[in-house]
Image (tube, grey):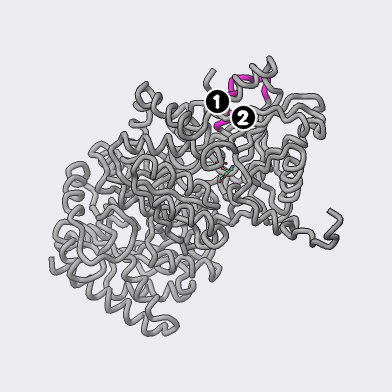
Amino acid sequence: MSTQTEPATEGRFGRFGGRMMPEALMAALDELTVAWREAMADPAFTGEFQRMLREYAGVPSLLYDATKLSEVAGARILLKREDLNHTGAHKIRNVLGQALLTRRMGKTRVIAETGAGQHGVASATAAAYLGLDCVVYMGEVDTQRQALNVARMHLLGAEVVSVKSGSRTLKDAINEAIRDWVATVDHTAYLFGTAAGPHPFPSMVRDFCRGIGDEARAQCLELTGALPDAAVACVGGGSNAIGLFAGFLDDGAVDLVGCEAAGDGVDTMRHAATIYAHQFGVLHGARTFVLQDEDGQTVESHSISAGLDYPGVGPQHAYLSETGRATYRPVTDKQAMDAFALLSRTEGIIPAIESAHAVAGALQLARERPGSTILVNLSGRGDKDMGTAIDWFGLGEARPDDDAGSA
Amino acid sequence: MSTATAFEKARADERAALVGYLPAGFPDVAGGIEAMTAMVDAGCDVIEVGLPYSDPVMDGPTIQAAAQMALEGGVRITDVLRTVEAVAATGTPTVVMTYWNPVLRYGVDRFARDLATAGGAGLITPDLVPDEADDWVAAADEHGLDKVFLVAPSSTDDRLRRTTQACRGFVYATAVMGVTGARESTSSLAGPLVERTRAVTELPVGVGLGVSTGDQAAEVARFADGVIVGSAFVRRVLDAGSDRAAGLAALSALTRDLAEGVRRA
Ligand SMILES: Cc1ncc(COP(=O)(O)O)c(C=O)c1O
């Protein structure tokens, strides 16, 4: 059954989703929906998408049997190695799909928003690869926190616009990208970075990312002869998680578990656990859960991981939580950083801090269900996070050469 | 009182109506009420009270700055309703321009009821299209409120038909593909859009986005039933800074210039 996957009304997932957007963008969203549907039905498009993923992005990513982590955890943990993809995260799947679609639609310019810079770098990469002009909107606060990624985007030929409105972070970067798009929609495509926003983005981004789940399902069957007991992913806007879940939605025996960023803790004001907070609302074009105050003003989220630091969530996740098909649990900064260190030490894999939230969730599940098989999407690698790790753990101070001669 | 009455009156005078926008709570709640009252006194036919919102995707830098000031000043939805009540008491139809989430959070029916009680005429909804508006349409109809949806140069004829069918009061035609903000010249897209809109509805058509001077108002008034001005008013208040009297004088002067413009066409 595909009731979990396809909205009954176009773009709706139960009471979530839709198109809460200015009229000026409706024609473009319709055009995009039609173009995307036609492209997905055209073997020339899907074939080219698969070729790019394979030859350029390093996909399918490996499924890795993390035996040493499993020993510590008390359950069999399998890691879907999206961290090994080109540009270091699952995000390349989505941008290659959207950028290829942009070219097919005859548009020449792409815009994107970015928080930490991962989606911005991926967008700049896809634009360079496919010969498109690229402008990336990034909150001023984030351009300062992530100067290295700004430099990467520059090197790839993209223009980076520092957004000074509102809280000067990801949500404001999205606002500014939408404002650009309203004015440029005839020749510009908006490469939205996660499975949120107005229809068709939640469904389209899911479909471009669903290789994560489809590949992992086949790889898990081949490796273990069975499906996993649970599939676990971190949830910011929700693209890597919905990409993973899409492969298992119809396998009722596979528990789907999303890990939200709980920051300092869900009992504080400083978190990004949108589904946990459970406040229905509208943000960036979709009805979904939104961190907001009593007057419906969006409140700022907090997480040690920039990629999870978003006050909304993709509407399909809101729906999956409401139907109970997936469950979502909060993971604090501390729990994520402990998992970050543990995976580094046990397996020699430094994950993105976003992905470390999923690892932490898997460790909790392992304690709850010892001996089970838990598939974790390792959505990205940790290179970008070393600054945060240095601060958190106090790393980077080499041992003084105090016993010279004894070596 | 429906905004339709203001458009009918303007039509009887063979001119376009002047619609003026300011966000509530800007520069503060009392100052905003004073400012809007000054605009009424100087010749605005309809007042649009903006509900300041944290994520205003249809607004350019000028209105964003005003909304942010209002929010930092602690403006609440109850203050917006208080502003509506004060302005509507002048007898000038007063509508609220709001992004959807604050209304959703407040409760759609509760908002409609409280707005009607305050004497408000209805809502302009920049990020709510009729396709998504079942609950608002029901609440507006129940409480006798105007439903002003937007049409854009990119709207297909089919969408124009469906959108205008869902409107009450007037239709808001966005003159440009873009966000709010003053512009040097009037848009060439506005005329054709108004023409296409008129082909499918009897409702008055107001044109907004980018109009900031009496001359531009006169140009737009030649083909539209209403001229909607926002950023230019906000700019006057911003530029006056802490000199409230100067701000009010500038607002009145701009209103007179625009009111003269809509009569000159
Ligand atoms: C490595 C990684 N994982 C996860 C995310 C969160 O995004 P999403 O929830 O869309 O997968 C990000 C976002 O930047 C990321 O870089």
Task: Residue under label 2, please give it.
Answer: A323
Q: Identify the residue shown where x is 61% and y is 40%.
A: A235
Residue type for callout 2: Thr
Is residue B191 among what the camera can see?
yes
Corner quadrant of residue A85 = top right
Q: Which residue is mark 1?
A: A4
Q: Check the residue under mark 1 and report the chain it is in.
A: A
Report the span colored magenta. A243-254
Of the residues shown, which amino acid type is indicated by label 1?
Answer: Gln
Residue B150 in the image: x percent, y percent?
32, 49
Asked if one can make out residue A18 in the rendered structure from this viewpoint, the answer is no
Q: Residue at x 75, y 55 (%)?
A: A393
Q: CA distance from mark 1 to mark 2?
A: 9 Å
Q: Is residue A349 left or right of residue B126?
A: right
- Which is nearer the eye, A9 or A271? A271
- The answer to the question of whether label 1 and label 2 lie on touching residues, with beta carbons closer than 8 A, is yes
The part of the image, by quadrant, that contains residue B96 is bottom left
Q: To which quarter of the image does residue A79 belong?
A: top right
Q: Chain of mark 2?
A: A
- With respect to residue B220, does A55 lie above or below? above
Where residue A353 appears, x then y in whole percent? 65, 46
Q: Is residue B48 above or below residue A228?
A: below
Residue nearest the viewer, comparing B153 with A366:
A366
Compare residues B222 and B84 and report the one nearer the observer: B222
Residue that appears at 29% across and 69% down:
B44
State the residue lying farthest toward the front. A405
